[in-house]
Amino acid sequence: MSDNAKTRRESRIRRHGRVRKKIHGTAARPRLAVFRSNKHLVLQLIDDEAGRTLAAASTNEPTERAADGNGSSVAAAARMGQLVAERAKAAGIEKVVFDRGGFAYHGRVAAAADAARAAGLEF
């Protein structure tokens, strides 16, 4: 890893730490955590008290990879937001707290959040 990439990763992790100081997921209101890589996007609903993932959606899932090979697009992020909201509804979850993971609320992160809201999750 180059020095610049390491610095960018360390900066994101520091930002995520500042976000996580204030955000805590419970069974009633889990944390909607976002991880964005260069190729994929992962959304998870996490109960921090129990240390369990309640629902998740990823562009790396076989059905999603077959549908569209490009998991790094805003459209793919919107599909993942809708999918995680549907899975949350199936698990009986209506309200969540949003954890942007140290990433800027822009582009794929914002598209996933907006799609989850539009599908019925309350932030």
Image (cartoon, helix red, strand yellow):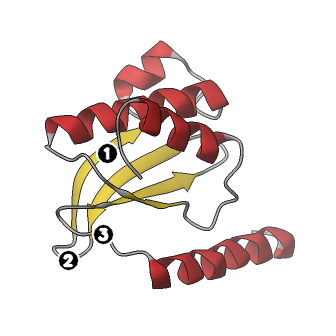
Q: Amino acid at mark 3?
A: Gly
Classify 10 Å Cα crowding around label 1: few (below 14), some (14-19), many (20 and above).
Answer: some
Q: Mark number for residue 25?
A: 3
- How packed mark 2 is, by other alpha carbons closer than 10 Å (few <14, some 14-19, many 20 or more), is few
| Residue ID at (42%, 53%) | 123
**Marks 3 and 2, how far apart in space?**
7 Å
Q: Which residue is mark 1?
A: 56
What label does residue 89 carry, if any? none
Report if the CB atoms under discs 3 and 1 are less than 8 Å apart: no
Mark 3, secondary structure of its residue: loop
- The reply to whether the C-beta atoms of the residues labelled 3 and 2 are less than 8 Å apart is yes
Question: In the rendered image, which residue does mark 2 sit on?
Answer: 49
Left or right side of 68 for 61: left
Q: Tags 2 and 1 in contact by the CB under 8 Å rule?
A: no
Image point (54%, 38%), residue name: 114
Q: Is residue 5 visible?
A: yes
Pinpoint residue 55: horizontal percent, then vertical percent.
25, 47
Q: Left or right: 41 with respect to 84? A: right
> Would you say residue 59 is visible in this rendering?
no
> With 85 as the anchor, is 53 left or right in this view?
left
Placement of the N terminus among the 4 image quadrants: bottom right
Q: Is residue 74 above or below residue 4?
A: above
Number of on-image labels: 3
